[in-house]
Amino acid sequence: MINFDDFIYNKARIPDNATEKTEFFKNLEQQFQDEIANSDAAIEYFKQYNPGSISSFINSVVSQKISLAQSYEYYERLYNKKETLELGFQNRAEELLELILQKKLFNLQLQWRAGKLNIKGIDIAYDFQFWESHIASCPFIAPIEEHEVEILKDFLLRSSDYEDMLEHSYLSWQDYDTIMEKDKDGLPDDMPAWYDYYDMRMGTSALLILPNHKGAKEDYYMENNAKAMQQENPPTTNPILYDSRPYLSGYGKELTKFINSCETDAHFVELFKYYDYANTDKNHRSEDDVESAIDTLSNADRPVYLSSHLQWDDAIVEGANKYKATKIAEALDAAYEEYLLRRDLGISGNLTTEEIHKKNHKDIICAHYRKAILNGRKFCGEPEDFNY
């Protein structure tokens, strides 16, 4: 069994300071991008796939490696069936409180895309995904209100598994295209349960039918940017009109296959194995799940009654989940008070708004989209600005 004490990204080697830690992983993201781009094995591997899918696939690989580097202990414990240390209910409540801000930001995005409002700090659609990562510091979201905390409590208490609300976490909370993808009935097919519940209680469902004018325009300018690039750099040989090679998917088996073929760090190879185990064994009730649930119930501060219609292990896990949801819901009041205190003191994260704006403009993906959109507008004979 591999030892993670000598893992190059072992927590003992990561800066403790929150600002330095954020910067460390941001630099690491670029390092991983460069490593794949300069890897002979990766270059050879990509030859069998459609080049149009490679950039997004690399982004997925890098994103997953960053995530695993940050949470390697969790996956190591899960895979080896060791007891997983739980976050305190108060800390969990503070985390979940931010989901209110995520929904409020998504509703702003819906209105922005429809041209219903302008937002200082938002130039392009991707900026919303940037602010998702700095949600506590986002300056243009209205503050959380007490009735929204009550809605979050109700949502928690109605769920048989308090983690159900995080089932969308493998995607971005601001990923408009994925969230708004329609099913056969013309309804959003991948809407987070929390977003649905918030809309139902707040009466904001009508925002979902607003048109995506901004997104359509950005797509148009991106296409024209591609035409401009083709004109500036015409192919030296006859272009291939159709590439029959398959597209790479940035999730599941494709990701694991790439890692097994091209990853040189044995720790990451092992971590992806752990990650694959965690995501493919969800239908199996693990001993860890039951043991953790029993531990939770044995330390409960009140009687917990189990459902009689469930199999014993399912009943125990459901009982523990409902208890944890209740405790977190109770802790939300204190978390909200802490939120209000920080807001009144002007404390909204580890970075100032100005520092975050600078990070936004240095963000590689943001910079790429801005440049492409402005160049597309120039190609169309339009002003090189974001007033469209």
Image (spheres, rainbow, N blue to C red):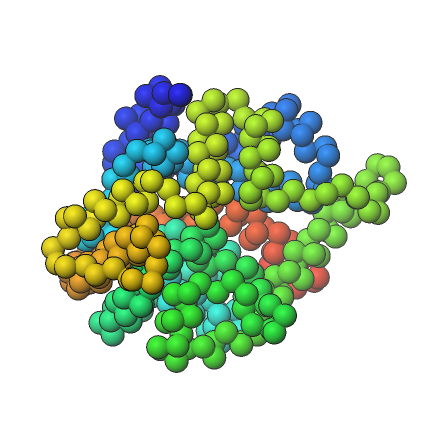
Total residue callouts = 0
Quadrant location of the N terminus? top left
State left or right for residue 73 relative to residue 218. left
- Front-most of residues 319 and 178: 319
Q: Position of residue 179 (x, y in %)?
A: 51, 62
* Occupied quadrant, residue 205: bottom left
Q: Position of residue 7 (x, y in %)?
A: 38, 23
- Front-most of residues 287 and 220: 287
- Front-most of residues 239 and 1: 1
Q: Is residue 339 visible?
A: no
Q: Residue at x 21, y 61 (%)?
A: 305
Q: Is residue 320 above or below residue 19?
A: below
Q: Residue at x 82, y 47 (%)?
A: 242
Q: Residue at x 53, y 73 (%)?
A: 114
Task: Give the residue at the far right of this rendering.
Answer: 238
Q: Is residue 154 above or below residue 58?
A: below
* Occupied quadrant, residue 157: bottom left
Task: Give the residue at the far left of this rendering.
Answer: 301
Q: Position of residue 11 (x, y in %)?
A: 30, 29
State left or right for residue 46 relative to residue 235. left
Q: Is residue 92 above or below residue 261?
A: below
Q: Residue at x 55, y 53 (%)?
A: 370
Q: Is residue 281 above or below residue 189?
A: above
Q: Is residue 78 visible?
A: yes
Quadrant location of the C terminus? bottom right
